[in-house]
Structures are given as structure tokens and as C-alpha cells.
Image (tube, grey):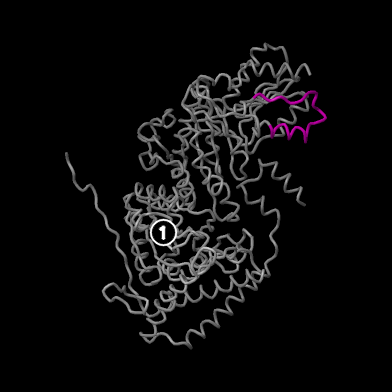
Amino acid sequence: MVVATVVQAINMALRQEMKLNPKVMLLGEDVGTDGGVFRASDGLIKEFGAERVVDTPLAELGIVGTSIGLSLAGMRPIAEIEFSGFMYATMDQLLSHAARIRTRSRGSYTCPMVIRTPYGGGIRALELHCESGESIFSHVPGLKMIVPSNPYDAKGLLASAIRDNDPVIFYEPMRIYRAIKQDIPEEAYTVPIGKANVVQEGTQLTLVAWGSMFKQSMDAVAKLNNKYSVELIDLRTLAPWDYETVVESVKKTGRCVIVHEAPKTCGFAAEIIATLNEKALLSLQAPVERVTGPDVPYPMSKLENYYMPSPERIIKAIEKTMSF
Amino acid sequence: MVKKTAATFSIDYYQVLDKDGNVDNALMPALSNDELKKMYETMIFIRALDQKAFNMQRQGRIGTYIQVAGQEAAQVGASLAMNDEDILFPSFRESGMLIARKHPIYRLLMYWNGDERGLFNEEAVKNFPICIPVATHIPHATGWGWAARLQKKKQAAVVAFGDGATSKADFYESLNFAGVFKANTVFFCQNNQWAISVPRSKQTMAETLAQKAISCGVEGVQVDGNDIIAVYMIMKKALEKARNGGGATLVEALTYRIGDHSTSDDAKKYRDEKEPQQWVQFDPVTRMEKFLQKKGLWTQEYKDKLLVQYGEQIEKEVEKFEKMPEPSPEDMFTTLYSDLTPHHRLKEQMEELK
């Protein structure tokens, strides 16, 4: 075992997967000599050379578009988009092509690739450095969407993403890149895509979150100091998402609160609530609450504390649900 | 103060076969009579098939179809210059290239009749599915050609697109990446003068489209796109350069879209009807006929016989197309991901359709 932060866990996964498969390559802005603006690819260019750890021209569309071509030709590209707010230039490539290649060619062409990108706010960054677009990608048939919340999952899920035979968006929680340290195995391992993690069992309320909001949720539960028996679920993967685990939990607890940083309208919580209506309506003892960002663009740092769901807001939602 | 010329450039233009069927012997590549006849025969086959597909759309037997008419030399010349091991990334107007590259005709008709199975590529010749949004497939050819270079394969990617595509960021970023990573890629631009209703003159103030390559440190060259010999020669050269690690080339083939943009379009609304008539004198098939006739390789009887044979061949494919069983709704689900196991939602939705 070794103590690692999220960003170190990502670095380990990249190194190990590149060693295991010579077709794996990393490309993006500043990923080579600089080792990535967050050091996620630190040291990799020295170990694997500039043909496999590639500093590309500054062009997001080009990075993702050429990654598609690389993958069609048998490579396993991992493209880094420096901040998820810069993903928008790549949407045409992802939605019109990466997501559809397998099905529109009826399986004769495939596009195994990973897009890694730091997402979310809370670090007083510049505009468009704080976006949470996970529900945008989860809405696209053909893509997979992963959002880890801790070093162990970050390493194991990234390994799964790299080995997966389909395009995967891998959101890295920037706010907790270095905030959580955890003992993780040194050797390579995988965490399955599409499997939620019941981190803490409980009987009275189900609390669902992912990515950096999972830490906020854990902090909220800690502050409640065993006032309620809360079942804490880390969704880990949004596409495909493990609704069975959430549904089973809510059937048991009868109450549910969902936390995400993205705006409320059409956020992923809406999908979870709709599914609970389909599959667990008669078990619900209170309306499902969601704690989310408001429907406004992510503000600059002066106002970001008002935007970001806090443990206090999460506790408020739990209290409201419990007292219904 | 220092003032000097920081860079200069020029764009070469090639024509081997003129409109009257005369060749420039200094430029003429070594081609056997059989090779010349194959070029001609493939062009008239594509023209016959293109007309058949157009008629079938008018008869309601297929959906929207995008015609090749007028661009046979560009499409056939480029396709014949490619090896089977190379890959083609076609746009929607490349039915001619696809067929010249052995894509089954019945599958092409299936595609234009709304069936994804038409894009299935089971053949040894690699043709990527047709790209519908303009220019968005260009980066794929750069990536593929980049991978070929990394894997030290003597293969190249050809991406085909029109003049309108050169206005998009996709085109520029792809060219730029191809320059930086020395991709085994040939960018094949068929400048057919029209992007639906917008003429080339409104697309860009650049004198040529080929010169856009210069801004990325990539070679750019212009060719008479209605001259199959010149297109073949220039594409062959660009492909050999790419396969041997010499980097990418942008080839601008000057041609003309004789028909409407698609079967859903009416060019009379925006284009002077005299313009396509003027282009008849530059027709790619006629000039090849004149040339072959001068060489004693062409007679009207030879052509008529071929057309009867091609007509029968196409009818057989049409029959095969029309006898294809309907696709299964499950097809929508089963090929979306490599493994459906974790996608429980999809399995539920697939069941609901039953």
C-alpha cells in the first residue's frame, strides 16, 4: 500500500496502464514536459518518451478529433482537456463521432479513448475553470461518464476507463485533487464502471453524491453526529449509472437527498428522482430533495461560496426530508 | 528598422489532360492502356450508378441522395491512386469514391435509404462511414495517419471534403496537427465551387484553397479535378510521400457540381442555369473519351456495350438491396457499446420495444 492523493493516484494509473499496454498514449496541452498543469502526468514523458506523452498544439477540437483517429487505428489515446470548461469545443467530435462510431458502423469501427479533464469549482479559479458538465455527457448515448471522489477510485476507475473499448469521459475532481490522502494498492487494479459504492450503510435516509460533492456530503453526515442513520452512496459512474443500488437503498430508507454541484435544471439528480418515481415510489416517505448549484453560470470566486453546495445546505435538506 | 520578406510561397497547378483530350507529354505519367481504360470505365460506371440512385430517389425507392455528377474524375482518380491498405474518410458526396474503393453497391443504397447497416465495412478495403456534418471527419484522418506513422506502417489516410469544409476550424486544426506530427494523411479537397447555395467566391478571400496548407507548414497543391490523369498522378505522389513518412499534403481538385446539392435541393434558386452548361465543355468523362479515341482505345460501340453490362450489374445490386430484410430494432442497442452488461437501462428499453 502507498499513501496517495487523487492526482497522485491518477499519475500512478497512467504510468501503470502505459507500461501494461504499449498502445496507450497521452496527449494534450502541457501534458509532456510540464507534466500537466496539475502534475497529473508528472514524469511520464521521461519514462515513455515524447511519442507517447505528447504536448499537442493548443487546440481542443484537434486533440479530441485526432484522438478519435488514433483510436480507430488501434491506439489507446488518453486526451487531457486542461479544464472541463474548455470541453465545449470538443462537443461536436464527442457527440457526432466518438459516441456514434460503433453503432453507426454497426460494429465495424470502434473508438476506445479516454478524455480526462479536471472539473468543478472551489479553488478560486478563473471563469470557465469550474464547470460541472457531467449531466451533459451522461445524456449522450454512446459515451461513458465517470466521476471519482477519492484516490482509490480515481486509480481503479481510470484503469478501467483506459481498458474500456468505448469512449469514456473521466472527470477529475479538481477541488479535492490534493485534499484527500488514502492508502491505495501500489499494483494496478480496476474499479468496475457502472457500479456505485455504498460507503456507509444506514436505515433512515439515502444520501447520493459523486466527485468532489461526495466529500461535502461526508462532512455533512459527520457534522450530524449520528443524529440520523444515513446510507451514503458514491455513484462513481453516471453513464451507465447503477440505479439498482440507489433504488434498493431508497426502498429500505424511504428518504433520499441528492447532491451535485451542477445547476439544478436537468442536472443528474433529476434523472435519479425520475427513476425513483418509476421504481420506488411507494417506498418514498418524503419528496426527494436535491442540493445543487443554482441555474446560473458558475460565478467568479467572490460568489462561489454561495453557488457551491455546502455541508450546511446538505444538512438543511436532510432535516427537511426527515421532518416531512 | 528592419524590413525583409519573412516568407514567400507559391501554389503549383497541374493539368495533364485538357478538355479536348490532349495530354501534356512532359507531365504524362507512365500508365498502361489497361490502366487508362480502367480509369475511364470506373468513371462511366460511377456516372451510371449515380444516375440510377438519383432516379430511385425520384421514384421513392430510396431517401435523400447526394449526387456525384461532374466530379467523377476527382473521385475515381483519387480512389484508384489509393492502396487497399489505405483508409478513406468520406464526406456525404463521396459515393463515387466508396464504390471505386469496393464498398458494396447494395450497402450504399441501404445507407441512402435510412439503414445504418449500409455503413458496415466488412471488406478488406477500409472505408470509414460517410460523414454528414461538414469537415468534422477531417481530424480523424489526421489521427489515423499519425497512428500509422507511430506504428511505422506504410499506409495513409485520405480524407475527402468540399470547398465549404475549408472554412471550418476542424479543417485548420487537422492540417496543423498533421504538420506538427507528420501524419501519413492526404487532405483531398474537391472544390466543386458550391457549398449548397454559397459560391466559392463567398467562402474565402484566399486565392486558392490549397494555400491554406502553407499556414500549417504542409504542402498544398492544386489540380484540375476534371482531369483524371492529373488527379491520379498528384494523389499517387501525395500518398507515396505520406506512406513513406514524408508528411501530409493538401490537394485541391478544381471541379464542378453539375447537379443540385442533394435531391432535396433546387439549385435554380441560387445558381445561374447557364453556369452548369458552361462546365459541360470541361466534362471529365468526355475528355477521357476523346483522349482514348485518339489512342485507338475508344469507340461508341465499346462504350454502349459497357453501359449495358453496367446497367445489368447495377440492377442486380438494386435487387439485392430491395430484398434485404428489414433491420431489427435491437440493432439500435446491441452495437452501441462493446458490452451491454452494465447498461441495464438499455436492456430495459430494448425489452420495451418488443
| Residue A173, above or below B237 | above
Residue B219, position as x, y percentages in the image: 32, 56
Report the residue that reaches farthest toward the right: A282
Q: Is residue B7 magenta?
A: no
- Identify the magenta region: A270-291
Chain identity of mark 1: B
- Relative to B295, is A72 on the left or the right? right
- Relative to B151, is B6 on the left or the right? left
Mark 1 crowd level (few <14, some 14–19, many ≥20, 10 Å Cα): few
Q: Is residue A280 magenta?
A: yes
The residue shown at (66%, 71%) is B59
Residue A105, position as x, y percentages in the image: 58, 56
Q: Is the N terminus of chain B in the top left, top right, bottom left or bottom right quadrant? A: top left
Can you identify the residue that label 1 sits on? B201
| Residue B91, above or below B351 | below
Residue A97, position as x, y percentages in the image: 54, 49
Viewer-side residue, A34 vs B54: B54
| Residue A225, above or below A206 | above
Viewer-side residue, A206 vs B70: B70
Residue A188 visible in this rendered orientation of the protein: yes
| Residue A100, above or below A144 | below
